[in-house]
Image (cartoon, helix red, strand yellow):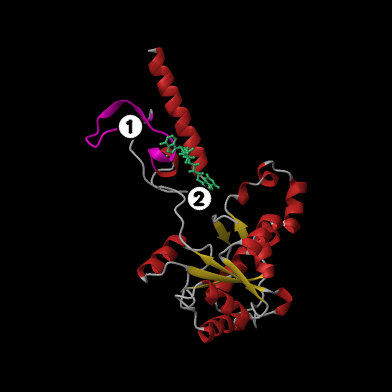
Amino acid sequence: MPRGAAAVRPSPLRLDPTGRRLPPPLFPSHANLQTLGHLGRAGHAHSWVVMTCSMADKEFALSGSDQNPDLTCKNPALMALQAHRTEAGSVRASIEHSEDVVTGNRLPALVAAMNALTPATPLDPARVEHEVLTRDQQLLNDYGKDAQWMSVRNARAYAPERALRIAPPHRLLDPAHGPLIALRLRPLTRKTLGGVQTTLDAQVVRPDGTAFDGLYAAGEAAGFGGGGMHGYNALEGGFLGGCVFSGHTAGRALAARELA
Ligand SMILES: Cc1cc2nc3c(=O)[nH]c(=O)nc-3n(C[C@H](O)[C@H](O)[C@H](O)COP(=O)(O)OP(=O)(O)OC[C@H]3O[C@@H](n4cnc5c(N)ncnc54)[C@H](O)[C@@H]3O)c2cc1C
């Protein structure tokens, strides 16, 4: 499978390349920017998420899958089907063919497969086992204080999340939910978050603030989230709208210029 952007939701265990669990709140799908900062400051080029098959079924998604037609067509019947189907085909293909995914029926086999993938930075199997057992023990009673489990339970209080996107809490070492899956995550640039400044008519502005006659910019080339339509915030999933809208603005300005 070609490399792509994967999204992992809140239940899997996230480890740094030494096998140490990332501190709260740096769990999957929480505080992604802080997670990148944490890993970058430590000089880590990758991290791991470890999950069960049941977690992968509901929580391992490929980027953009939320835009699937079942949701965007607002078809409740298809959405109900989606609850059971997930993105089975593409996710299964990722697990079977991705160079970043390994599996194991038991934890020692999984860690061995992870280490075969990253021989330069091998995980300490005892450290990984300690992290897994410590987290699993927090599920032994309903009042466990593990911050990640508390967050998962909170997210599952919302019925659509519970039905569609977040697996019921279960132990990583519960064989009923196996086999285990580990996914190596590496940072990927998928948005520029930069671009040139423009006027509201999409005309490029020089550093001295004067308009650049005849030069127009749209989409990511024109700033955060497509023409800076969302200010300085890069709202996940909100780029295409800004890109299309800023293209429309530039097109109208150019047409008006031609007619003038
Ligand atoms: C994996 C991934 C998932 C994403 N998911 C979402 C999402 O779910 N929702 C969302 O809103 N946004 C998403 N985005 C972001 C969104 O796709 C981009 O912000 C948007 O497509 C940018 O549009 P654009 O027209 O500015 O640039 P692009 O779509 O990159 O278009 C630029 C075009 O210019 C062409 N080009 C480059 N150089 C030259 C040249 N010298 N001469 C001629 N042509 C050239 C390129 O080939 C390209 O076709 C995602 C991005 C990625 C990478």
Q: Amino acid at mark 2?
A: Glu
Quadrant assignment for the N terminus? bottom right
Residue 4 sits in quarter: bottom right
Instruction: State the quadrant of the C terminus.
Output: top left
Q: Residue at x 42, y 67 (%)?
A: 45
**Which quadrant of the structure image shows residue 103?**
bottom right
Looking at marks 2 and 1 on the same chain, the residue that comes earlier in the sequence is marked by 1
Which is more toward the observer, 26 or 162? 26
Q: Which circle marks residue 204 in the picture?
A: 1
Name which residue type carries label 1: Val
Q: Is mark 2 within 8 Å of ligand 1?
A: yes
Which residue is identified by label 2?
A: 236
Q: Where does the magenta region start and end?
A: 202-223
- Residue at position x 74%, y 56% in the image: 85
Q: Is residue 166 visible?
A: no
Residue 165 lies, in percent from the top left, at: 65, 60
Give the secondary structure at mark 1: strand
165 sits to left or right of 185: right
In the rendered image, residue 106 lying in the magenta stretch gets the answer no
Q: Is residue 29 above or below residue 132?
A: above
Toward the left, the furthest residue is: 208
**Where, by quadrant of the figure, is residue 116 drawn?**
bottom right
